[in-house]
Image (cartoon, grey):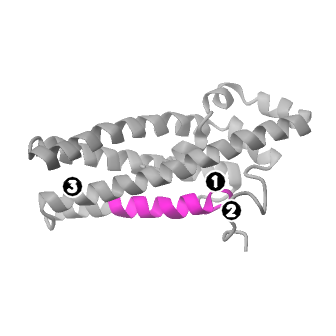
């Protein structure tokens, strides 16, 4: 039951070969850049949505911010899937990120429901903002999943470097992407915002 296992009991988060691919692909840098950008967009949008719900003001700004957040999510999801393909050989649902990817699908669905309600005109402003808040709540949980994986990756990377200096030397050749990509897992989540 590979996909059903939580954590890295069945396999390490990255094999030595996967770690080298992770550190050498430009998609790791892309994810490392998109994740904090998406989180910044999320923070601004969350403020605008909550402000609208409290005061009834700036509805158009709140709506636009959720649309931008959703587009950022779609972008990070697509580039995250490419990253997963390069590193693990499949676009989504690899054992190392199976549950994060599953939860990312919920995040995508909730954001997409917001867009459907908005552009089809089938939701009231309050329903739209409630949908946005549900999507954002799911996004925060999903981001936390990826932060946890980042922590696991750092711990396993430290252990792997101690155990295998040859892999450490190979990974060090991964140029700027290896250094800039301290948080590829957050971005792929932060899926992907998500």
- For label 3, the crowd category at 10 Å Cα-Cα, with few meaning under 14, some 14 to 19 and many 20 or more, is many
How dense is the environment of label 1, judged by Cα within 10 Å: few (below 14), some, or many (20 and up)?
some
Label 3–label 1 contact, CB within 8 A: no
Judged from this view, the residue extending furthest toward the bottom is 1
Decide whether residue 74 is among the magenta residues: no
Between 165 and 46, the one lying in front of the other is 46
Q: Is residue 170 above or below residue 10?
A: above
Discs 3/2, front: 3
State yes or no: discs 3 and 2 in contact (Cβ < 8 Å): no
- Across and down, in percent, residue 18 comes to 75, 47
Characterize the local packing of mark 2: few (<14), some (14-19) or many (20 or more) Cα atoms within 10 angstroms: many
User: Residue 23 location, x and y as percent?
Assistant: 70, 36
Q: Which residue is mark 2?
A: 95
SS class, disc 3: helix
For the residues labelled 1 and 2, the Cα–Cα distance comes to 12 Å
Q: Which residue is mark 1?
A: 85
Question: Relative to 189, does residue 162 appear above or below in the rendering?
Answer: above
In-image side of 22 versus 91 (left or right): right
- Quadrant for the N terminus in the image: bottom right
Q: CA distance from mark 3 to mark 2?
A: 34 Å
Which mark is drawn over residue 108?
none
Lower position in the chain sequence, tag 3 or tag 2:
2
* Pointers 1 and 2 in contact (C-beta within 8 Å): no
Residue pushed farthest left?
56
Asked whether residue 87 is in view, the answer is yes
Residue topped by disc 3: 129
- Which stretch did the figure color magenta? 92-111
Question: For this rendering, which residue is in front, 19 or 43?
Answer: 43
Could you tell which of marks 3 and 1 lies nearer the N-terminus? 1
Percent across and percent down for residue 100 are 56, 58
Q: Earlier in the sequence, mark 1 or mark 2?
A: 1
């Amino acid at each position: 039951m590979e996909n059903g296992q939580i954590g890295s009991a069945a396999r390490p988060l990255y094999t030595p070969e996967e770690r080298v691919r992770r550190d050498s692909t430009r998609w790791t840098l892309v994810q490392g850049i998109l994740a904090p950008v998406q989180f910044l967009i999320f923070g601004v949008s969350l403020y605008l949505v909550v402000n609208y719900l409290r005061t009834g003001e700036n509805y158009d700004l709140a709506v636009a911010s959720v649309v931008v957040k959703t587009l950022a999510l779609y972008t990070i999801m697509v580039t995250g899937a490419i990253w997963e393909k390069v590193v693990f050989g499949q676009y989504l649902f690899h054992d190392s990120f199976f549950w994060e990817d599953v939860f990312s699908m919920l995040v995508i669905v909730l954001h997409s429901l917001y867009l459907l309600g908005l552009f089809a005109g089938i939701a009231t402003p309050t329903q739209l903002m409630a949908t946005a808040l549900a999507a954002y709540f799911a996004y925060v949980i999903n981001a936390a999943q990826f932060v946890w994986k980042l922590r696991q990756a750092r711990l396993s990377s430290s252990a792997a470097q101690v155990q295998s200096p040859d892999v450490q030397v190979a990974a060090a050749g991964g140029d700027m992407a290896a250094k800039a990509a301290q948080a590829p897992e957050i971005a792929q989540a932060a899926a992907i915002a998500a």
